Amino acid sequence: MASRTRSKVSQCITNENNQPAVKSKATKKPATLEGKLKKVGSRNAGKGAKAGLLGNTINVERKVLLAATAQPQLQGPQVSDDDEDNETTDDDTERDIAAMDVVERSPAVHVGDVAAMDIEKEEPETGSTPDPVTDVNEVAELRAQLAELLQKNKSLEQQLQAAPPSANVDSIPRPTGTAGKDFSIQVAMNLAGSVSKDGKYKALQRCVKDLVGHARVPYDIPWKQVPVQTKSLLYEAARQDQPFLRRYQNDWATEEIAKQYLKNKRKTAYKNGWLKVSDKYTHLKQNSACRSVSGSRSSKAKGIRESREARKASKKARKSSAPTASDDMAV
């Protein structure tokens, strides 16, 4: 501020003859500093560059003020000397500011370029959208995996059906036909004809029923729709729990007992309305209507047991009624 005041006083003294005043470079000092600051700011200089430029500018102004106050105030022709000193100081200040501008400008531009490059690299990642080609490939891969699993399931089922018989010498093959229609399970297992055998068969029935519940075999679907893995677990558990079932080839006895149990359970669910009757069972009503009311409802195993008991009783009666040797000698 003191330099501005002295400049104005010197201008008034030198322009006594009403000549146009010539602006000294000291009067342009504030404008030059502000322009330099704007120039540095427009070039995206960093905060450190701006702070350094402001600090250097303040130091320059402080030096000019101290130099102005330290010198004695002169009048007349000495004012031109002060102006020359001020002009020299202003030139030095402008050169310093220009040099600082050149030095501070390059790092700021470099940092800005690096930041811009980072932003350009991050934009494709944040704004990425799902590729439809990738989705199609994933669907195709899932379909291929599903087809492979179905093929494995089919091969396991074929291996189960074609499994070799047990190495037990007393193995019993499966009879031909359908259980309950063409043959009796108990008779085919050779567990009919005596009370002890009948008790053994019923014990095996209870064991298989419990294993069916533990294996969570579904009863609301036909046996052929039950997964092969579930059947395999059931057969393995039955062989371990009841070694007697190992004598039947390919676990057919375990399979028939389980099928019979699930069929009866499904029949009870149909009767109570817990399951909807399928259309393929509509013919059963006609078959039941054609059945004789006076016909026997007993099982085949019971008939075989009764016939055997009758034969034993008749044989025992014949032995008791036959004449002995003592009776012949008495005659």
Image: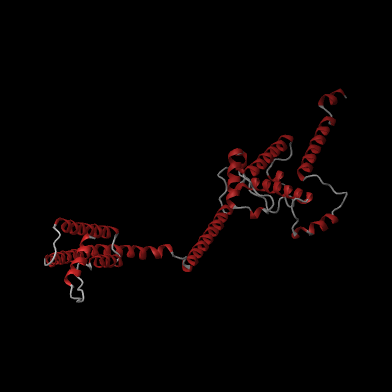
Q: Residue at x 55, y 56 (%)?
A: 153
Location of residue 89 (image quadrant): bottom left
> In this view, which residue lies farthest toward the bottom?
19
Q: Give the camera-side residue of 29 and 102.
A: 29
Q: Position of residue 141 (x, y in %)?
A: 49, 63
Q: Residue at x 66, y 40 (%)?
A: 210
Quadrant location, the C terminus:
top right
110 lies above or below 317: below
Q: Position of residue 53 (x, y in %)?
A: 24, 60
Quadrant location, the N terminus:
bottom left
Q: Is residue 125 left or right of residue 248?
A: left
Q: Position of residue 95 (x, y in %)?
A: 17, 66
Applied colour scheme = secondary structure
Q: Position of residue 241 (x, y in %)?
A: 60, 38
Total marks drawn?
0
Q: Is residue 17 left or right of residue 324?
A: left
137 lies above or below 239: below
Location of residue 45 (image quadrant): bottom left
Q: Give the camera-side residue of 113 and 80.
A: 80
Q: Residue at x 79, y 59 (%)?
A: 283
98 lies above or below 174: below
Q: Give the camera-side residue of 72 and 61.
A: 72
> In this view, which residue lies farthest toward the front?
17
Q: Is residue 162 left or right of residue 11?
A: right
